Image (spheres, rainbow, N blue to C red):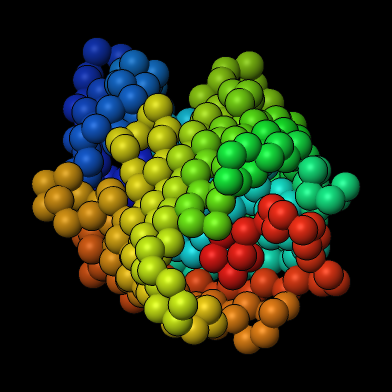
Amino acid sequence: MELVLLGNFIIPRSLFEVRYSSKTDYMHKQLLLICKYDQHRFTKFLKFCKSFLATIAVYKHNAVRLSKHKYLLFSLFFFACTFSSFAQQDEQYTQFMFNKLRYNAAYAGSNGSPSVTAIHRSQWIGLEGAPTSQVVSFDMPLLKNRIGVGGNVVRNVIGVSEAITIDGSYAYRIPLGPGIMGLGLQASLRYFNTDFTDLTATQPIGSDNAIPMGVQSKFVPNFGLGFYYHTEEFYLGFSAPRLLRNNIDLADDEGIISREIQHFYVMGGVIIGEDDFKFLPQMLIKYNPTVPFDADINASIILLDRITIGATYRLGGSKEKGFGESIGGLFSAQVNDDLLLGISYDATLSDLRNFQDGSIELALRISFGDREDAPDKEYVNPRHF
């Protein structure tokens, strides 16, 4: 398997065939993209390619064959960076229940005390250039839990591309019935960076001036909104972390290929049972207008209010086989009132399972100081919600 560089584009050879025309001195190449994956997921991607690359004139030396072991790396880079406007841009987290502030600004302050959460995810272990993600979150309640503030620092790397996001959240928390309703506002700044010097080819890439060289980067601001309601028995949230569809092209030309995509999230969970044994089903629904419906479904049991053991299932993957994207398990321990440790492992169900060894995720949460323990106990048990 190999890729071909055509002008500014990195095209997997297995995804197209080339027709030659002898009408001119150039090779006019009609790119007939044949997608071997989820047709719905790449519908807009294909439409864009067919219209923008319908006819393109290039010299023979512009087709540079890349080394075989770089195929999957460049496939990831191509889909995630060059055409990121037609794909999922946000990173995945299996332990989303410990990482709600990453998705929903209105969660700020819900833990009841100042808290720091850190998560590291290595996705598709063993696959060169596969995504790795880290997030560090902080949030705390103020004014007797009527206000929550917080923020995230997120780093996501895939292939030669890196994205760093810094955001701040504000939540106004209102007592409503048996629980608390939070209304949140988030402001963010994202830094995109692609280092083309890390690319490897069997022929000098510098021989083609159309291929980017060196490092290209860009800063992009954005804002989002969130809603979060929780009681001692359940929680429900809705959020849109980024509402602006910013241009995220790294090139300086006037054309716009890639934009930030609006992501919408719905999360919810309910505790069933009492005392030393509880059942906790949870779900994170992810909607992106450019890709099919996606969701993480988790079912856990909680023992002694300290140990959580659960199974998780993620939709997606191949539409033809229909098994989903992944299935996995998670384990977490509330070591004491201030320290939580968690680990999860995902086994891939899609065709990528033949090229990697699954995904692993580590989580840590530390709480500081006293909780905002008002007489009406308006905060929810932080070990669960």
Which one is nearer the viewer's eye here, 23 or 269? 269
Is residue 88 in view from this perspective? Answer: no
Could you tell whether 211 is left or right of 110 in the image?
Answer: left
**Quadrant placement of the C terminus:** bottom right
Residue occupying image coordinates x 22% and y 41%:
38
Percent position (x, y) of residue 288?
42, 33
142 is higher (above) or lower (below) than 298: above
Could you tell whether 257 is left or right of 246 in the image?
Answer: left
252 is higher (above) or lower (below) than 326: above
The outermost residue toward the top is 23
Which one is nearer the viewer's eye here, 240 or 237? 237
**Quarter-of-image position of residue 319:** top left
Which one is nearer the viewer's eye here, 174 or 27? 174
**Quarter-of-image position of residue 326:** bottom left
Is residue 91 in view from this perspective? Answer: yes
Percent position (x, y) of residue 296?
37, 54
The outermost residue toward the left is 320
Could you tell whether 309 is left or right of 326 in the image?
Answer: right
Percent position (x, y) of residue 157?
58, 57
Residue occupying image coordinates x 21% and y 35%:
39
Percent position (x, y) of residue 290?
38, 29
Residue occupying image coordinates x 11% and y 46%:
320
Residue occupying image coordinates x 52% and y 36%:
238
**Quadrant placement of the N terminus:** bottom left
